[in-house]
Image (cartoon, rainbow, N blue to C red):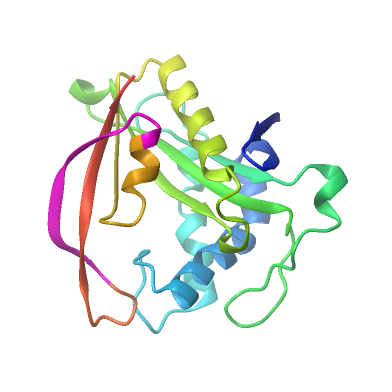
Amino acid sequence: MQSNQAGRAKVVLERVTPETLAQYAPRLAAMTTSHILNHNRSINFLHPFTSHQAIELFLKTSSYLSLDGPGRVIMWVAKLPSEESREALESVDMDGKSTDNADIVGTVQLAFHTSPNGVHRSEVRKLIVDDRYERRGIARTLMDELQRYAKEEGSKLCLLDTEAGYAEHFYTKLGWKLSGYIPNYAMTPDGLEKRDAALMYLEL
């Protein structure tokens, strides 16, 4: 584990294994569905969907966490330090049921490309922070570690897509550049609106 201080929040970063992912997936799903249900964020699902499907969204990554080489995925979680974990806000899934691991307040994934001519590329996936802990530097702490690790592992170019108008400014402050927009890229959870995506890149 690695302790990081950023902004107002002190969190401990932990690299996720297939074994710990099985434990953490319900908590990660609860964070994700909160953004969907409370903020209408375009994250994978259309209504109706279930808690089980939200958990599977993370569990399907499990086999890639143990790979060594092209196609591997590295996942981190940000946890409150032990001295603060007792005061963690309750984690509740979309069915109103409590989940374990309420001390997890954020997560991110780094995926390495699979093709031989793309081994120098990597991609950011599922940067998610508990909406009750936003604007405390947690996302930046996760991204700083992701970018450090990607560079250390030989990645020369990192890519991501994000909902247009949502987080572009955050990534720009970290040095990311805007490549362009794709119109009507993803539907809102209610299926009533199509939102544009911003494509961004970082040369490491």
Label the magenta part by its dominant secondary structure. strand
Residue 22 quadrant: bottom right
Is 80 situated left or right of 28 in this image? right
Of 154 and 136, nearer the camera is: 136
- Whether 10 is drawn above or below 92: the answer is above
- Which residue is drawn at the image coordinates 38% and 15% (left, top)? 154
Residue 177: say if magenta.
yes
Q: Is residue 124 visible?
A: no
Residue 100 quadrant: bottom right
Of 171 and 76, nearer the camera is: 171
Extent of the magenta region: 173-187
Q: Position of residue 198 (x, y in %)?
A: 22, 49
Of 88 and 33, nearer the camera is: 88
- Whether 122 is drawn above or below 94: the answer is above
Is 176 situated left or right of 184 in this image? right
Is 117 situated left or right of 69 in this image? left
Q: Is residue 98 visible?
A: yes
Q: Position of residue 132 (x, y in %)?
A: 62, 63
Quadrant (top left/top right/bottom left/bottom right) for the N terminus: top right
Of 166 and 129, nearer the camera is: 166
- Whether 75 is drawn above or below 114: the answer is below
- Which residue is drawn at the image coordinates 64% and 61% (left, top)? 27
- Whether 71 is drawn above or below 136: the answer is above
How many discs mark residues in the rendered view?
0
Residue 190: say if magenta.
no
Quadrant (top left/top right/bottom left/bottom right) for the C terminus: top left
Is 113 situated left or right of 111 in this image? left
Q: Position of residue 197 (x, y in %)?
A: 22, 55
- Which residue is drawn at the image coordinates 74% and 53% (left, top)? 103
- Which residue is drawn at the image coordinates 61% and 40% (left, top)? 16
Q: Position of residue 183 (x, y in %)?
A: 12, 60
